[in-house]
């Protein structure tokens, strides 16, 4: 975790704890400051060394917050935060991960019932104690009880967007080591799953102990969980990282094995067995000439050299590269995103794998915000940033006012008409095409927040659900289908409204939605914000199979958010999407044609 992130995290915690004790307004100020600290481009410890005044240069950081930052840099703690922790000794992160439980509720639950963690919360809810508290009722209590399992699970898995930068950092670090021959991630992070249990890292080297030492010495590692001669685990930024070191000649086999998924590996192993081969983490072997083949069951944790040797039997067909592992089995190399045992092995055998969409195929973003709503930059700045990225066009889609949108943020129909002139100005100075749209809201019944005539005038319309996100499947599906059928709607934005690890979102009949959207020429969004990844991969598959279109958008609130596009692309790849399935791989002219 960068130092700035670490400081930001403490400020967020400070805000939560203030709010829990009933303080108003101040928490919001701390959160704003925390966001800016996290985004600040230079290491904050350098500013702190110059003094409080320098720290106050950061937007929205005043003297009270600046002095706490300096205190932290100098002493390693913030005494006021320590006091707050002592007076409210609760696991704030775990408790607030329960949907509907905010810091304020945590404060009340502690005061009234002494609840400090998820187990105690569950016990109190089961015993009916929570509904006895003033301001709480049986319904609230039941909601809490219903949401605890999801919260527990989300405590155990990291969002891809949090883990991936850590994985990039550790692989960069290892790649620079002299004794490291090759390094790659494996496991769910290589498959770009939306959440990961841990980060699996694989290194090819003949000097495993030196590499393990370098790994446990990684400056960003917060603690070492275990260290052996070929394996080690550390924790960094709250994620566990598992390292395995293998000899270069077996790197491809290990990479294939530890990438998984488990289901993919089981089916692949059967393909090998059918051909008289043996497949394991050490290689692919022809065992047809061996009478006494006892190698029918490869043990995942064969760490002892003797046991490993017993797995290296027969004639080695492949092991150094992953491509050769698949090739020797008569299969095309399968992109990791597809390795979920949902037909990819059959497709690889038939030479029928899709040519998956790539980040370089994306030619513009169709869902972005500016300072007109809750973005942080002017329209002209966003357009310039899009042009700098090499995009061919940029779409301005600020929030319309309506259900789920804070009044000060949303644009009324009049605001949107007024915005037209500003977009026109930006267009005149722009090196790329600018489309003027809106992100309007889909109400619980499927109606839209913005006037139909205005929607028809705009270049494009993103319609998204921002309220009533706990609807049942039937009304939720009807709601989104009705929006997809609206003649002015081009894209359904973040269709389920889920927030990974914090809100499940609408449980939609995705096949029905995909078919309706395909029929009406409406694209369904893959929102690339790593908090969302909505639609998820399986849903994208439904869209592709229905012959529909997805749009991979970052929902950028500032230029830095454009970087999230890779998460959207990877998610779309998990749904087997090719460039032709993606709206914004089109040229400006083709996009304009789709929008009409
Ligand atoms: P995660 O970490 O829960 O997000 O998911 P994975 O897929 O990264 O799972 P992990 O870290 O437990 O193991 C990494 C890979 O190693 C997994 O995808 C497949 C492989 N693997 C692990 N254990 C077994 C096993 O018992 N049998 C087989 N065939 N493969 C295994
Ligand atoms: Ca893993
Ligand atoms: Ca693992
Ligand atoms: Zn939205």
Image (tube, grey):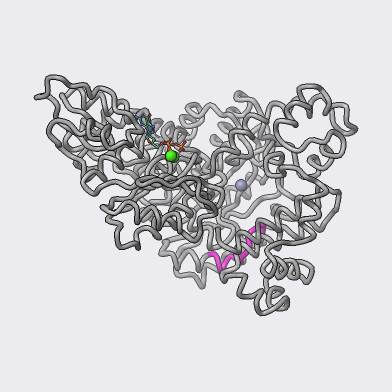
**Majority secondary structure of the magenta segment?**
loop
Q: Nearer the viewer, residue 70 or 476?
A: 70
Seen in the picture, residue 503 relative to 12 is either above or below; the reply is above
* In the image, residue 376 lies in the stretch drawn in magenta: yes
Seen in the picture, residue 482 relative to 451 is either above or below; the reply is above
The residue sitting at 76% across, 60% down in the picture is 29
Query: In which quadrant of the rendered image does the N terminus lie?
Result: bottom right
Q: Nearer the viewer, residue 592 or 258?
A: 258
Ligand 3, by image quadrant, is top left
Which quarter of the picture shows residue 275?
top left
Q: Nearer the viewer, residue 186 or 487?
A: 186
Per the rendered image, the range of residues in magenta is 373-382
Residue 205 percent across, percent down from the top left = 28, 52
The residue sitting at 51% across, 71% down in the picture is 428
Which quarter of the picture shows residue 216?
bottom left
Residue 594 visible (yes or no): no
* In the image, residue 379 lies in the stretch drawn in magenta: yes
């Amino acid at each position: 975790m960068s130092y700035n992130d670490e400081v930001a995290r403490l400020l967020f915690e400070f805000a939560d704890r203030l709010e829990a004790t009933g303080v108003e307004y101040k928490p919001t100020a701390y959160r704003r400051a925390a966001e800016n600290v996290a985004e600040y481009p230079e290491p904050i410890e350098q500013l702190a060394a110059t003094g409080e005044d320098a720290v106050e240069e950061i937007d929205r950081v005043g003297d009270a917050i600046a002095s706490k930052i300096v205190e932290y840099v100098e002493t390693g703690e913030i005494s006021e935060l320590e006091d707050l922790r002592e007076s409210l000794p609760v696991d704030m992160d775990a408790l607030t991960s329960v949907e509907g439980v905010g810091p304020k509720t945590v404060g009340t639950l502690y005061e009234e019932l002494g609840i400090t963690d998820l187990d105690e919360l569950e016990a109190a809810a089961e015993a009916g104690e929570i509904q006895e508290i003033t301001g709480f009722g049986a319904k609230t209590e039941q909601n809490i009880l219903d949401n605890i399992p999801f919260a527990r699970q989300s405590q155990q898995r990291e969002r891809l967007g949090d883990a991936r930068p850590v994985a990039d950092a550790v692989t960069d670090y290892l790649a620079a080591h002299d004794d490291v021959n090759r390094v790659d991630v494996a496991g769910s992070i290589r498959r770009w799953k939306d959440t990961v249990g841990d980060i699996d890292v694989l290194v090819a080297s003949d000097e495993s102990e030196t590499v393990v030492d370098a790994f446990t010495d990684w400056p960003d590692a917060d603690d070492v969980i275990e260290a052996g001669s070929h394996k080690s685990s550390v924790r960094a930024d709250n994620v566990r990282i598992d390292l395995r070191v293998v000899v270069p000649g077996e790197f491809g086999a290990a990479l294939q094995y530890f990438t998984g998924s488990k289901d993919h590996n089981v089916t692949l192993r059967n393909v090998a067995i059918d051909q008289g081969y043996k497949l394991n983490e050490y290689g692919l072997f022809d065992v047809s000439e061996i009478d006494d083949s006892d190698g029918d069951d490869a043990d995942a944790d064969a760490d002892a050299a003797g046991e490993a040797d017993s797995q290296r039997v027969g004639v080695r067909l492949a092991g150094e590269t992953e491509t050769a592992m698949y090739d020797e089995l008569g299969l095309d190399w399968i992109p990791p995103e597809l390795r979920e045992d949902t037909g990819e092995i059959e497709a690889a055998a038939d030479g029928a794998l899709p040519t998956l969409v790539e980040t370089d195929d994306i030619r513009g973003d169709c869902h972005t915000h500016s300072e007109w709503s809750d973005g942080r930059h002017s329209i002209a700045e966003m357009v310039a940033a899009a042009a700098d990225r090499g995009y061919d066009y940029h779409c301005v889609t600020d929030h319309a006012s309506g259900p789920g949108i804070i009044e000060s943020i949303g644009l009324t129909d009049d605001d949107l008409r007024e915005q037209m002139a500003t977009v026109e100005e930006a267009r005149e100075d722009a090196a790329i095409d600018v489309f003027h749209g809106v992100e309007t809201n889909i109400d619980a019944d499927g109606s839209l927040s913005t006037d139909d005539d205005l929607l028809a005038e705009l270049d494009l319309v993103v319609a998204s659900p921002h309220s009533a996100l706990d609807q049942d499947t039937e009304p939720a599906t009807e709601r989104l289908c009705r929006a997809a059928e609206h003649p002015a709607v081009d894209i359904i934005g973040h269709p389920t409204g889920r927030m990974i690890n914090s809100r499940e979102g609408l449980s939609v009949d995705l096949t029905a939605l995909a078919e309706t959207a395909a029929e009406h020429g409406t694209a369904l969004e893959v929102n690339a914000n790593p908090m969302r990844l909505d639609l998820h991969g399986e849903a994208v598959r439904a869209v592709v199979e229905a012959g529909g279109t997805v749009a991979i958008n970052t929902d950028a609130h500032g230029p830095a958010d454009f970087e999230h596009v890779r998460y959207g692309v990877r998610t779309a790849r998990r749904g087997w999407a090719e460039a032709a399935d993606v709206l914004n791989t089109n040229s400006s002219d083709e996009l304009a044609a789709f929008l009409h």
